[in-house]
Image: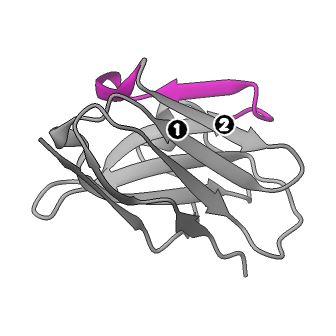
Amino acid sequence: QVQLVESGGGSVETGGSLRLSCEAPGHTYSYNAMAWFRQVPGKEREGVAVIYNGGRSTRYTDSVEGRFTISQDNGKNTVHLQMNSLKAEDTAMYYCAGDFNPPYCGGSVCLEGKYLEVWGQGTLVTVSS
């Protein structure tokens, strides 16, 4: 059973940066897609960024476009989310999720949370003004 472990969350001031990481310890099979989601208590989960198609394609939600970058360490099943120019509204619990088995997702379908069968426990990001 694949497990995903997130790290890198913390507290920063507005305009600061954080880098989140998501690893699949001991897992050697490659994924079809890995995505980051976030959720604030009382609100729906939001898809933030996804990397898929062998790492050749990425997709972001509009609110983070140009500020966040998703990337992968090839061959290591590790995905990062570099978050720059953070805003108070980026405060949330961030989760990574992986698509390891068919049916596979791509692009916006992944950001809807479809076909992502493995989820991490989350890492908290707090941005204060």
Please state the horizontal and vertical placement of residue 30, each as a whole percent of the image.
84, 54
Name the foreground residue: 5 vs 35.
5
Q: Which residue is mark 2?
A: 71
Q: Amino acid at mark 1?
A: Gln
Mark 1 vs 2, N-terminal side: 2
**In percent of the image, x 61 and y 42: which residue is there?**
105
| Residue range highlighted in magenta | 52-65
Question: Neighbour class for label 1 at 10 Å: few (<14), some, many (≥20)?
Answer: some
The answer to whether the residues at label 1 and label 2 have Cβ atoms under 8 Å apart is yes
Name the foreground residue: 21 vs 27.
21
- Viewer-side label of 1, 2: 1
Looking at the rendered image, the quarter that the C terminus falls into is top left
Please state the horizontal and vertical placement of residue 67, each as a whole percent of the image.
41, 24
Q: Amino acid at mark 2?
A: Ser
Q: Which mark identifies residue 96? A: none
Q: Which residue is mark 1?
A: 82
Please state the horizontal and vertical placement of residue 54, each as a whole percent of the image.
80, 35
Question: Neighbour class for label 2 at 10 Å: few (<14), some, many (≥20)?
Answer: many
**Among the 4 quarters of the image, the one containing residue 123:** bottom left
| Placement of 27 over or under 105, stated as above or below | below
